[in-house]
Structure formats: C-alpha cells, structure tokens
Image: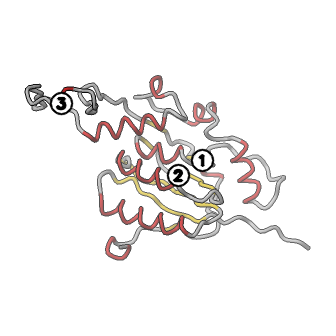
Amino acid sequence: MKTETKLEPRRFELRQIGFNDDYYLSRIYRLEEILEEQPEQLQIDIVGENAIPADTALLIRSILNQRSPKTQLITNARSSVSGGSALIWLLGDVRMIREDAKLYFRRSDTSELSEVKLDEPWKNPETGFDDSESEASPGEDEHARVLDAINEYLPVKEMAGRMIGIPVLRQFGLIGNEALDDFLATSLGSKNAPESKAGSESKLKPIGAEVESPKSTSAQR
C-alpha cells in the first residue's frame, strides 16, 4: 500500500521584540544560511508584541526576494502584526494567522523629509538650508518604504491607522485562498482533506521539523 509523504516545512521563528540589533542580525544570518540550502518550504513563525523595525523588515524582504524559486514561503502570524512585521507576513506565498490576531500599520509623515536631487541648488553654499527644526528622520523614510511595499497587497491610504481583521484579509485574498487550501490538503496527506477555517491557526498543528529557535548571539555568529 502506497503511503503519501507529508510535506515538512523548515520552521523559522522570528520574534517581534522592537529594536534589538543583535537579535535580528543573528536571525538574519541564520535565515540566509537556511535559504542557501534551498528548502522546498520555509515557514516563518512571527511571534511577540513589538513590531519588527522598518529597516530590518526591508532587509529581510530583500533576502526573501532572492530565495530560490524552488522554495515556497509560508508566513504564520501567531500574534498580531504591525508595520515591518505586517510586511514580512504579507510576503508569504501562503499566509496563516491566529484567529483573533490583527494586522496594523500607521500612517507616515514624510512631509519634512525630502531627498537631495541633482538639479537642486544644493551646490550653492548660499542656499541657507537649516534642518535644526526638522523632526523628520531616516527611520520615517524607511517606514514610508514599508508602506509602499504593503500597498502592493492592501490599500494603505484607506486602511492606515485602523485594525485589520481576518474577514478583510480574506476579502482581499490574503488568506483562505487556493494556495492555502492546496497546502493544507497536501500537508494532511490527502487531496480530499476537509476544508479548514481559513486564517485560523488553531486548525493548523505544527508540521514536521522543530522551530528554529533563537540561540545566543555569540553562538550564531
């Protein structure tokens, strides 16, 4: 009797702990190592309360965008996600989210921040530009770029500053889509597997390999 082999995604935990360069650098190095192995499936489990910083999220995005076409990306939000964390979750080919979790991103104010242009009079020392009263920062520009990326999936202008739940995510096809149904059916070892509640992590038990848990920074470098 032929037994179907269940898919076993490579599990990778990414914690939302706000600004912590040592932690994120160690996880980024580990992520690059895993992607070099070209796993068939990589599942990123996002946990924690504080959003991943914008610049870190943009770096992780650039790394994930360079993964092998053979690697399917699964993103699993085990907590609510906001800002940079929301962007990483949206990058998944297949997305899962806890039943009561939400997605959120704040508006960006870059009115005080502009980029130097070649045709501007910055070469003239008499321009008298003074930024001493400007409250803008490069971090705000990074957040604006995160919003630009999120806008590829959700209308940022209309949704910024508001909590987004499972019904809306489902309406935009971000969860409960055909890719998720196929993934669940294959993982359960049957194409006739009963339909699960889209977006509900409670229906999705851990599959295969253990989670890649963060170790001490010194051990990962």
Q: Nearer the viewer, mark 2 or mark 3?
A: 3
The colouring scheme, among rainbow, by chain, secondary structure or one colour, is: secondary structure
Q: Which numbered disc flags the more N-terminal residue, 1 or 3?
A: 1
Q: Where is residue 72 drawn, in percent x and y?
A: 63, 56
- The C terminus: image quadrant: bottom left
Q: Amino acid at mark 3?
A: Trp
Q: Which mark is residue 65?
A: 2
Q: Which mark is residue 95?
A: 1
Q: Which numbered disc flags the more N-terminal residue, 1 or 2?
A: 2
Front residue of 162 and 172? 172
Q: Residue furthest top?
A: 158
Q: Amino acid at mark 1?
A: Arg
Gap between marks 1 and 2 measured at Cα: 16 Å
Q: Which residue is mark 3?
A: 122
- Circle 2/circle 3 CB separation < 8 Å: no
Residue 134 as seen in the image, left or right of residue 184 = left
Please say if 87 is above or below 10: above
